[in-house]
Image: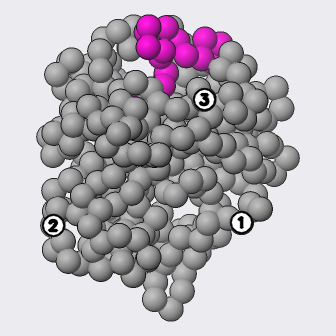
Amino acid sequence: MFAAISALLMSLAAVTADAAPGVAVAQFQPFKIGSYSAVALKDGGLEEPVDGKSFIVGQPNEAVGAVLKAGGAPADHIELSIQPLLVHAGVHVLLFDTGAGGFFGDIAGKLPESMTAAGEKPASVTDIFVSHAHGDHIGGLVTSTGALAFPNATIHISAPEWKWLSGLSEDEAKNFGIQQVSALVSAIKPKVVPFEPGADLLPGIVKAIELKGHTPGHSGYRIGSGADSVLVIGDAMHSYLVSVRKPYWQVAFDGDQQLAATTRVALVKSSASSGQRLYAEHFPFPGIGKIVKGKDGASWQPESLH
């Protein structure tokens, strides 16, 4: 099902900072979610060529390039940030995804440096919420020695996603950017608390939102409530231009490409209608903003934080 992304993710694991200078720089950006203090944490970044197979599939490269160019971006490649989110909510210190760790080489894995720069300590994290089990989202769960990177944190992952991750062979896991999957699963298993899709995980603080199609148990998370709440969307959308303006276009990364496109279309529509704040882990740093509807369709509106 996921064979289309195998070669891409395996090649990304070997990329070095020399091939993408300046991408993986420690950065952080504070903002508020109601009364909660949040901080976007830069882990790194990726670039995907516009070639009809690495990212968007089934569309002419010229059409993809035109959408990118119209948004002021280069037409020949798609730039994707990697940025976990940390939130202080009362006695809870919440981390949403953990970046790539050492899985993608030096283009990523800067979460520890970004946390240090922000004054955050791994040992203080109480809860980790995993959107899905791809290497750029779970690699940071363990250190280079295989130890737990966040030793005091409960790890929340949907039951279908945990079952899928736990059943991957070493070769299968490499297709998703995961190295030494058996060791990873063994290290985190004592801390994992699987949940049913859509579960209310920390009542009044974090609710899981099922966003189907990317992986077997892909989950978003709504933090807080009301107009100030933030929905962390994981990989329901990747590009702030293509995913928002052409949500029905299919993506090579998605396990069920049609279902993921349907989810994306619904997410764009509902977010534009409701004004829901979104945290998009692959949109330009710091990834916080809204989708707005204009005369030319939907577009991404980054939140002004300065």
- Residue density around tag 2, few if under 14, some if 14–19, many if 20 or more, within 10 Å: few
Under circle 3, the secondary element is helix
Kindly check if marks 1 and 3 are in contact, taking CB atoms under 8 A apart as contact.
no
User: With 76 as the anchor, is 268 left or right in this view?
Assistant: right
- Please tell me which residue lies in front, 289 or 261: 289
Q: Residue at 52% x, 32% y: name it.
A: 110
Q: Is residue 86 above or below residue 91?
A: below
Query: Which of label 2 and label 3 is nearer to you?
Result: 3
Tell me if residue 260 is in the magenta stretch: no
User: With 115 as the anchor, is 227 left or right in this view?
Assistant: right
Q: Position of residue 264 (x, y in %)?
A: 40, 62
Under circle 1, the secondary element is loop
Q: Residue at 35% x, 9% y: name it.
A: 183
Query: Which of label 1 and label 3 is nearer to you?
Result: 3
Figure quadrant of residue 18? top left
Mark 1 vs mark 3, CA separation in Å: 24 Å
Q: Which mark is residue 113?
A: 3
Q: Which mark is residue 304?
A: 1
- Residue density around tag 1, few if under 14, some if 14–19, many if 20 or more, within 10 Å: few
Under circle 2, the secondary element is loop
* Magenta residues (range): 139-153
Q: Residue at 72% x, 35% y: name it.
A: 118
Q: Position of residue 48 (x, y in %)?
A: 29, 54
Q: Amino acid at mark 3?
A: Glu
Residue on which disc 2 sits:
58
